[in-house]
Amino acid sequence: MKDRGAPQVCRGKDIMAITLTEKAAQHVQKYLVRRGKGVGLRLGVRTTGCSGLAYKLEYVDELAPEDQVFESHGVKVIVDPKSLAYIDGTQLDFAREGLNEGFKFNNPNVKDECGCGESFRV
């Protein structure tokens, strides 16, 4: 079996592919503390919906060798290589609107979104 090595960790403004706003980072940090474990937040895409792709978020307890790891405001954002092509340059924000709150994706690669906001196309 071939050793793939350690996950690649990227830091610094010029090489950041995925960033978090300060609000998003604070939300993730609070949740990780409450959860009591975890190394960061995994951001990826899955095939679904009218336009083809949807974001997926999950908290990560262990890194895989192929993972790309970006650090923003002290939070690790983990991305698999296949998803990175669709979300490179994305900024993740956390916003509260009325009674609703959640993550907002600012992805410069998006060409079209479905009407319900569930999926996107690049």
Image (cartoon, grey):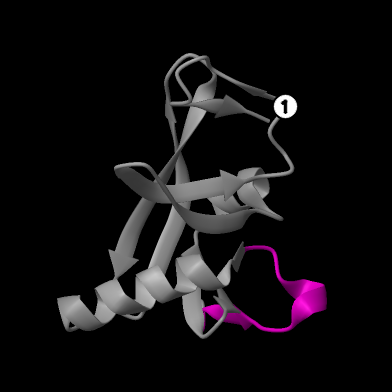
Membership of 14 in magenta stretch: yes
Res. 67 in view = no
Point out residue 100 in the picture as x, y percentages from the top left corner: 32, 42
Quarter where residue 113 is shown: top right
Above or below, 60 relative to 36: above
At label 1, counting other C-alpha atoms closer than 10 Å, the crowd grade (few under 14, some 14-19, many 20 or more) is few
Quarter where residue 21 is shown: bottom right
Q: Pick the residue in front: 16 or 22.
A: 22
Above or below, 67 relative to 72: above
Q: Residue at x 38, y 49 (%)?
A: 102
Span colored in magenta: 5-18
Q: Quadrant of the N terminus?
A: bottom left
Membership of 17 in magenta stretch: yes
Q: Amino acid at mark 1?
A: Lys
- Horizontally, residue 47 falls left or right of residue 108, namely left
Secondary structure state at the residue bearing disc 1 = loop
Res. 112 in view = yes
Q: Which residue is mark 1?
A: 111
Quarter where residue 29 is shown: bottom left
- Horizontally, residue 90 falls left or right of residue 119, namely right
- Horizontally, residue 38 falls left or right of residue 47, namely left
Above or below, 47 relative to 95: above
Q: Residue at x 39, y 46 (%)?
A: 56
